[in-house]
Image (cartoon, rainbow, N blue to C red):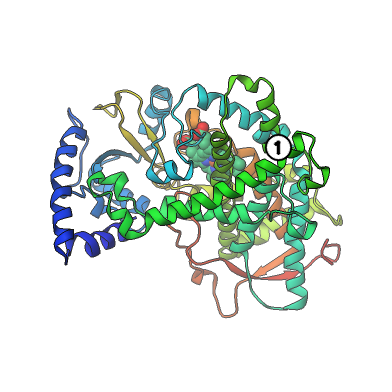
Amino acid sequence: MAPSIIGSLWTVVINPTTPVCALLLFISLVLFFRLGKRRRPVGSLPPSPRGLPLIGNLHQVTATPHEGLHALSLKYGPLLFMRFGAIPHFVISSGELVREVVKTHDAIFTYRTTTKASRVLFSESEDLLCSPQNKFWRLTRKLCVNELLSNKMVKSFQFIREEEVGRLVKTIGSSCINNIGSEIDLSKLFVKLAGSLVSRAVLGLKSAEEGGRESDEKMGKLAMEAVHIITDLFSFEDYIPALAWVDHLTGLNRKLKKTSRAINEFLDRVIDEHEMFNNGGEEGNDSQNDRKCFVRVILDLRKKDMMGLELTRGNIRSILLDMFLAGIGSSASSTEWNMAELARNPRIMKKVQEEVRSVVGEKSKIDESDIDQMKYLKCVIKESLRLHGPTVTIREASTTASIGGFKLPDKTIALINIWAIHRDPNTWERPLEFLPERFLDTSYNFTGQDQVYFPFGLGRRVCPGVQFAMSEIEYALANLLCWFDWELPKGMAPEDLDMRGTSSIAAHKIVPLCLVPVSVKVSAPHR
Ligand code: HEM
């Protein structure tokens, strides 16, 4: 975030070369200070690093914000007050304070902030991710859980996982045979896998090879583009409203509109096709469908009672988009980090492969029920989510709250630094090391009830996609570890592997993960 704001400020504001810019800057400053006065919280505030006029503490936000905020919290304490442009934030970096948020104030910290990107991408229609906690949120969440994300529904998608992971294994297998010793870009393959799984379960799309009219990859690509805009590009309108006009100059507005238009057009085409089918239209138009996918269930329900929900076309598009935004990058990056950590830790790679292979035995296919016996694999995934899961989660308070002895005003935005809490040396022994054994025989789970380990978030807004994500990650990893050995590219030592993550909330590797697969099992499905 920081490089883009400082770069943009420099080129457009700090170094104005035209009188027009100077005049706009003057007007903006006047507006800013008037707005700023209205937004400033009152009362005793937590410690705060010194800010600057106009940008507040934005200059202290480093290229990886979670790391920069962690460094500040070591200096100023676990509860920080910071102003990002005109917007006051409270940064929480300790499990104790998280306990206060979840246990004492869960009903208060349930709002999410909307941003310019979310408003444009969702075309101002209410959706699940950004909705405040209201009737719409409750009913939509129930709809998504019942019809897509519950254990029962996730089990019903097992054949999709088997087909898509099978396709992944085949791709890697043929690389082993045709390009012996060549590295393969796993990061790219994991995004493709996650995109196909969500596309098929949510929209019923099939791959082009299987005759799908709309490619199952296209929506995944559009969603990743949207995630990039949301998390990597700075919006002046969000943080310094008086400088909203700068978003035109940086190209943000254009990018947002273009991506939003492409998403809407794509989703409209898919919804139209399903609607036609539901209305008894041409059966041939069902280039789709493996089963009754999520969008068709919504369209069916809309004809009936819809659980009291009145969904517009805009709402339907937004809910579908939510599943893509929340479900692809997070799962893909998690699979990527698991493989990266294993490649960097040969002892752990060997141990987890031995477990997986001993459970699978001589079979030529892994059944999902086999995964239950892979206890060490589950620890590997937990440890990977501790070190490389989502970096922060952001909530807005619906009313005033008292945290850590400070009274926080209503509309306070709380930024919970999961990254810092997952690496707190007061909780975790040797916190920076990848040690899956630490999770053996512990009760840490993904329900968001624990204040020191919550990779899927916490409280009422905890991720409802845990089951969907875990089934995908576990099954993909079990297959990759069973059928292949993995080597680093020629000349690279484990400690040379670049482990830097992006600044996004679901940070993926900056440098894509490329490893060399070696096919090992005679009974492997790709042979
Ligand atoms: C490894 C994969 C994933 C991780 C680490 C993850 C993590 C998270 C986190 C941290 C939150 C915010 C929770 C909070 O504010 O406390 C969240 C929310 C959410 N996630 Fe996930 N997620 C993953 C996969 C998925 C998948 C596959 C889906 C659906 C297909 C999904 C759907 C959602 C939705 C809809 C929300 C918003 C819930 C609400 O606001 O009520 N997630 N996720």
Compared to residue 109, the image places residue 183 above or below, namely below
Kindly identify the residue that appears in the image at 41 percent across and 43 percent down: 421
Q: Nearer the viewer, residue 38 or 392?
A: 38
User: What is the count of numbered marks?
Assistant: 1
Q: What amino acid does circle 1 point to?
A: Glu
Residue 11, by quadrant, is: bottom left
Q: Nearer the viewer, residue 260 or 409?
A: 260
- Say left or right for 518 vs 118: right
Q: Position of residue 527 (x, y in %)?
A: 84, 67
Q: Quadrant of ligand 1?
A: top right
Q: Position of residue 234 (x, y in %)?
A: 34, 53
Q: Position of residue 224 (x, y in %)?
A: 53, 54
Tell me if the residue at label 1 has its CB under 8 Å from ligand 1: no
Q: Does residue 508 show up?
A: yes
Q: Position of residue 303 (x, y in %)?
A: 68, 25
Q: Secondary structure at mark 1?
A: helix
Compared to residue 24, the image places residue 98 above or below, namely above
Kindly identify the residue that appears in the image at 48 percent across and 29 percent down: 459
Q: Quadrant of the N terminus?
A: bottom left
Q: What residue is shown with label 1? A: 275
Compared to residue 186, the image places residue 276 above or below, namely above
Q: Does residue 434 show up?
A: no
Kindly identify the residue that appears in the image at 49 percent across and 36 percent down: 129
- Say left or right for 342 vs 34: right
Neighbourhood count class around disc 1 (C-alpha, 10 Å): few under 14, some 14–19, many 20 upward: some
Q: Nearer the viewer, residue 133 or 498?
A: 133
Kindly identify the residue that appears in the image at 86 percent across and 57 percent down: 362
